[in-house]
Image: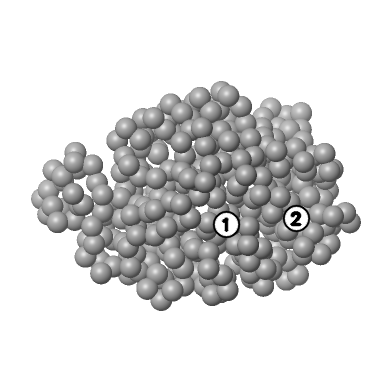
Amino acid sequence: MSHLFSPLALGPLSLRNRIVIAPMCQYSAQQGCATDWHTIHLGNLAQSGAGLLILEATAVLPEGRISWADLGLWDDANEAALATVLESVRRWSPMPLGVQLAHAGRKASTARPWDGGGPIAPGEVHGWQVMAASALPFHADGPLPKALDEAGIDAVVEAFAAAARRAARLGLELIEIHAAHGYLLHQFLSPLSNQRSDAYGGSLENRMRLLLRVFDAVRAAVPVRMAVGVRISATDWVEGGWDVAQSIVLAKALEARGNDFLHVSSGGLDARQQIPVGPGYQVPAAAAIRAEIGTPVIAVGLITEPAQAEAIIDEGQADAIALARGILYDPRWPWHAAAELGAKVHAAPQFLRCEPHDVRGLFEG
């Protein structure tokens, strides 16, 4: 029996298999509102046979968007637009749906990737003043962020909670709090970007404080039926920065608060990062954290082959694997993995005609 295609519980949420579609920004929203692109994109991925689909980084405040075209969940218009998309996706797929709630901090106010992706200064079209843990730019020549004061921190915590309540009203089954890839919550965690001297800076306990506050606020804001977890960068890949040892301390603190899963990525905080990119390059960090906690761990990063994914689960390095770019390239990756590993996936009956391939033994009834 394939371990990759065995069930998994993330707190209250039960998954058919251990393949997770990771959040992937689409830069196709209008004032934070989902568009028909999201219907096409999410509808396609929801037919993949994966166990879980997590919507892209969704900003809790307008100034928390990575780009002006990012998805948001800060007001009624955002909520209504996303409701329309989700209604269509759910009509044709039973796949559980989650959302990643995020604030980009000093990495906000950028152009879309296909427009160059560079920072846009305040006062320019599509630009605004960015905020951060400390007044330190992401790039030496980049825009200078303003350090959040205590009132600003409180507003961020409440914004995460308010967006979580909207997610609950939308019937989403999972929330992932984005504390990775150099965005705001990661900026507070890392000593490279956090040089505060108040209760949110200095010691590891202080640097974790904002993320733990956000987790508690989100958990309290949603019903017990919803899974709540966190995505982290396990290491900055820069000497003196955030690392696996600190990630383990954080993972234990989150576990004590009832965290339902930990999604382990890496990097994104500092331009000096030196990442040894290769197949499964982030899996050792996930495995090191998993060995210290009971919380389910999701591994991600250049996991491209079914046998590779099966081995990660079989060897106990992680409890689930996440796909991002790979499933954009091959939206039927779970089908192909099931065929290779002798497993079954759920698929819509409309696809039963995809012969000459013999798929009748592949799909669940």
Return the disc, 1 or 2, that comes first in the chain's sequence.
2
Q: Residue at 23% across / 42% down in the picture?
A: 348
Q: Judge by depth and name the residue closer to the eye, 43 or 222.
A: 222
Check the picture and name the quadrant holding the N terminus.
Answer: bottom left
Say whether residue 160 is visible: yes
Could you tell me which secondary element the residue under label 1 belongs to? Answer: loop
Is 224 rendered above or below residue 236? above
Residue 312 appears at what percent x and percent y? 41, 71
Q: Residues within 10 Å of mark 1 (few under 14, many from 20)?
A: many
Could you tell me which secondary element the residue under label 2 belongs to? Answer: helix
Q: Tell whether 8 sits left or right of 339.
A: right
Is 175 rendered above or below residue 127? below
Residue 282 appears at what percent x and percent y? 53, 67
Q: Which residue is identified by label 2?
A: 209
Q: Judge by depth and name the residue closer to the eye, 271 or 288.
A: 288
Is 96 rendered above or below residue 232? above
Q: Residue at 48% across / 45% down in the picture?
A: 225
The extreme right residue here reads 197
Say whether residue 185 is visible: no
